[in-house]
Image: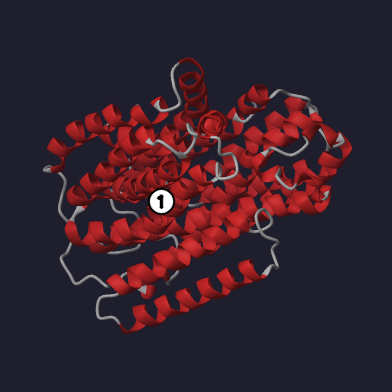
Amino acid sequence: MSLMLTMFLAALDQTIVATALPTIGRQFHDVSNLSWVITAYLLASTAVAPVFGTLSDIYGRRAMIIAALSLFIAGSILCALAPNMPVLILARGLQGLGGGGIMPIVQTLISDMVTPRERGQYQAYFSGVWMAAGIGGPVLGGLFTEHLHWSMIFWINVPLGLVSLAVLLPKMSKIPIFHRRRKIDWLGGVLLMAAAVLVMLVLTWGGNRYVWLSPEIMAMIGASVALALAFAWQAGRAEEPFLPLRLLGGRVVPYAMAAGGCAMGAMLGLTVHLPLYYQVVYHLSASEAGLALIPLAAISTGGSAIAGRAMARAKHYKRVAIIGTSCAALVGCALALTVLPLWGLLLLLSLLAFGLGTTFPVSVVSLQNSVSRSQVGTVTGAMNFFRALMASFTVAASTAILLMALGANISLVGEHRGPVNSIAPAEMIAAFHYVFGAAAALLGCAAICMILMEEKPLAGPLTPVEMAE
């Protein structure tokens, strides 16, 4: 329960802020930099995910979860007290440093306590946490902003974070110790974080602040490639590399990362842009469009639960994910080829979400099961890192697809601030055929990765069927 509360904190902060942004912009008389309130958190949390994962393998989970939660609480306090937009953006970056550390450490702690065979069921519980945060975040943000003050969306993190620490820390002594002290390759860590920040900036600014082929975007792409090559060179020569490249090889890790990244990218690409589709095609209000996203967010938890139960009981545990992602890809193709009434669209999206949800527990547990105990934190942090990059890339690609299909007159479609009323429903339907098609392609890639991934036996208690054999 304490781990779920900790995860809920980080998940909630990615959704609760959005509804308060217009009010914050009016108070600080600064709308042009408003997107940085989201971007600063995203940049920081993505860049530090592999750092916290690796450090937890060196210094232990207790020290790192204290550090992550402390940074998160300190950032929340500074956000609530921010007197202007620049301070708020910097504080959001600090908050992102903590939030980016919470994710991989919580997942690693689960791996320390629960055998791989049983771990999938616990991953399903945490999918439920994400669902609750995804649904409750915008609602809470709107209530706090409308009836109290926007700073309450940050103040709420302080008591929750302190309660989480108070409940979690006494229990940490019961957790087995698997970390191993070793030298830290700080240069490799810095190079990896710098490359990640530049990639995220390209995906955030490309097609929005700068044209994709502009000198600024090309320079950042070149710099990120150079930093990535420098990181690979450093990892090859360091005695104890920050992120061992051999850890990312083999028959399990790359396929599990790719499958999880494709599924996450498909889900977020649809979640970000579907409200615009609902408003233009079905004439829903903004709040109704938000409610119409619930099937996509909620039903995926059911898929995760089914996959987690299959991992605990079945020898060939990845079959449920192969079937789930394949069915989701077929549903995506159906969405790309047909025009449906609202109830039909919501039904198909629910089926897509259910199939998509089967990917997450199978990919996470398979990845952790394939490495030694002393490297679980490192590989989990790397997984979160690549998932975030894939999700950001998919959102940027989906936005680019809509811009090409609808024209440059809705240059802010990614933030849903374009002239919605000027778009004809027929044009939006035609444009979204490509978006649904892209989601289907990603889910098809996830299914292929699951097929190619080696199915290593999971450690843990045997099922009655296996005991009989």
Say which of 200 and 266 sits in front: 200
- Residue 314 image offset from top left, x and y in percent: 42, 46
> Which residue matches tag 1?
45
Q: Residue at x 78, y 34 (%)?
A: 420
Q: Residue at x 47, y 31 (%)?
A: 16
Query: Can residue 317 be seen in this snapshot?
Result: no
Count up the numbered dots.
Answer: 1
- Residue 220 image offset from top left, x and y in percent: 56, 69
- Residue 459 image offset from top left, x and y in percent: 29, 53
Please identify the quadrant where the N terminus is shown.
top left
Q: Residue at x 34, y 68 (%)?
A: 189
The quarter holding residue 424 reads top right
Give the answer, above or below, for where 335 lies relative to 211.
Answer: above
Task: State the SS at label 1.
Answer: helix
Q: Residue at x 60, y 48 (%)?
A: 325
Q: Left or right: 450 with respect to 100?
A: right
The quarter holding residue 235 reads bottom left
Say which of 50 and 369 sits in front: 50
The quarter holding residue 118 reads top left
Q: Left or right: 199 with respect to 379?
A: right
Q: What color scheme is it?
A: secondary structure
Query: Can residue 168 be seen in this snapshot?
Result: yes
Q: Amino acid at mark 1?
A: Ser
Q: Left or right: 256 with respect to 430?
A: left
- Residue 194 image offset from top left, x and y in percent: 43, 66
